[in-house]
Amino acid sequence: MTRNVVITGVGAVTPLGVGARTLHERWSAGQSGIEDGFGRASEFEPKEHLSTKEVRRSDRFTQLALAAAREALEDAGWDGDPPYDPDRAASVIGTGIGGIGTLEANHILLRDEGADRISPLSIPLLMANAASGVIAMKHDLRGQSFGTVSACAAGAHAIGMAERIIRYGDADAVVTGGSEAAITPLATAAFRRMDALSDSGISRPFDRRRDGFVMGEGAGILVLEEEKAARERGARILGYIRGYASTSDAHHLTAPEPSGRGAAKAMELALKDAGISAEDVLYVNAHGTSTPLNDRSETNAIKAALGEELAAGMPISSTKSAIGHLLGAAGAVEAIATLLALRDRIAPPTLNYEEPDEGLDLDYVPNEARPLPNGDARAIGLSNAFGFGGHNAVLCLEAS
Amino acid sequence: MAATATREEIEGRVSEALEEFGAEPGSVNPDATFESLDVDSLDLVELAQIVEDEYGVQLKGEDMEGVATVSQAVDLVMSKLG
């Protein structure tokens, strides 16, 4: 028997504010959360969302995840404990780097004051699986709990794993997504040293003048449930995870394979997994980092996966134009942005797009949101996420 | 300083630390158990570090075994101070 996976709740903390709908509304209105070359979650005040103990016991990346999880669970109508046997509820949360802020602060203590001065909480705060463990503890999720680590594809990998866990029958509900808080001195300097960051501080995916990504922080969390179980408990269904696929470029530690071969394969396999043909896709939420290499190879990948003709007519936009690159949170935040866009049948815009680049000739929905075709067509979209290491993860979503 | 710390001072500092850890202000009193204050083993390692900073006494894991209330923790620090 087929087990379909539905999305019943979403939550997000991003540079555009606290709240998944806030992200959707502000991005669709063309607002940017980037200031002074960074996409900080500046409206997020941990103590407004978490207890004193929770704040002390968590790195910022876990704090962001906890706040987004609370929103998602309230959105799903979970009141306290899971509306399932806790053994059948799981937690899978991705991150690119984990608690690097904690790591850096304690390394300074180690260097300047000695080994006895570092916090006994260092390891439990900095470990990359902290968010999944803490969310499982807080919400009594006793099934599988683990983190996914695949750089900027981690959030999408987490959702893909969560979808598989439900579809395979290991759980009936999974709290899943991604989180990142890496706007720290070391991470910022390191990305800058490898020439990945934008010198201009402007995120302008697919534009000829793009010069690197803008670092962002935040979290996106979704509540996934098995469709039949969700309907039995009377849940409101926001949409479906219809398909998921993941591939590897097997090409280079950081650079995407120029033809987009691996990314295209992931898009094709996600559609195949969903049992959906490329003709039925209304919208593509691109990885769209604003780096010279990604945006070119991703354009090639979209053409290869959908075919030149379909690709030419496809609205494609990058959430990163409005919030920067949320690294391990990006795939999850952007999956949420995709779902809410599909629900409103709108293609939010790629901001700062003014000058076309040679060969980057698709419809990137420049600067203003646009309605998607209305009517009886199913609202189906793809959300792309690619990461250093050559990881490609693609989700096929359908709004209900 | 170690030589001049009174029981009241130590109790005050321990209580302050427990509130920093997240215990409800007002619920911390000498008879309160760590369990009731939601103070766990990780908090006690931090408490030991604070006590060492303030009073120069080292509390090891085995010293903390059986210490279940605020007053027992203060007793332990007092005994180490001699």
Image: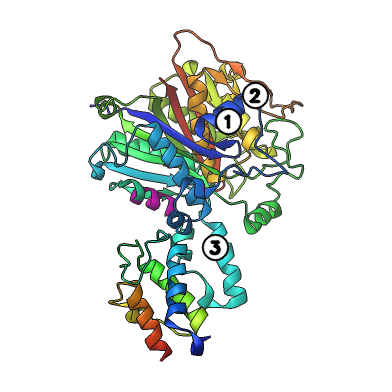
The quadrant where residue A218 appears: top right
The residue tagged 3 is: A103
The residue tagged 2 is: A364
- Start and end of the magenta stretch? A129-137
Work out whether mark 3 precedes mark 1 in sequence or the reverse, and give the earlier one. 3
Disc 1 to disc 2: CB gap under 8 Å: yes
Local SS, label 2: loop
Q: Is residue A317 depicted above or below A333 in this figure?
A: above
Q: Is residue A132 magenta-colored? A: yes
The quadrant where residue A287 appears: top right
Q: Tag 1, which chain?
A: A
Q: Tag 3, which chain?
A: A
- Quadrant (top left/top right/bottom left/bottom right) for the C terminus of chain A: top left
The picture places residue A278, in percent across and down from the top left corner, at 48, 19
The residue lying at 74 percent from left, 28 percent from top is: A357
Q: Amino acid at mark 1?
A: Ala
Residue A76 - label: none
Work out whether mark 2 precedes mark 3 in sequence or the reverse, and give the earlier one. 3
Asked if badge 3 and badge 1 are on a common chain, one would say yes
User: In front: A232, or A291?
Assistant: A232
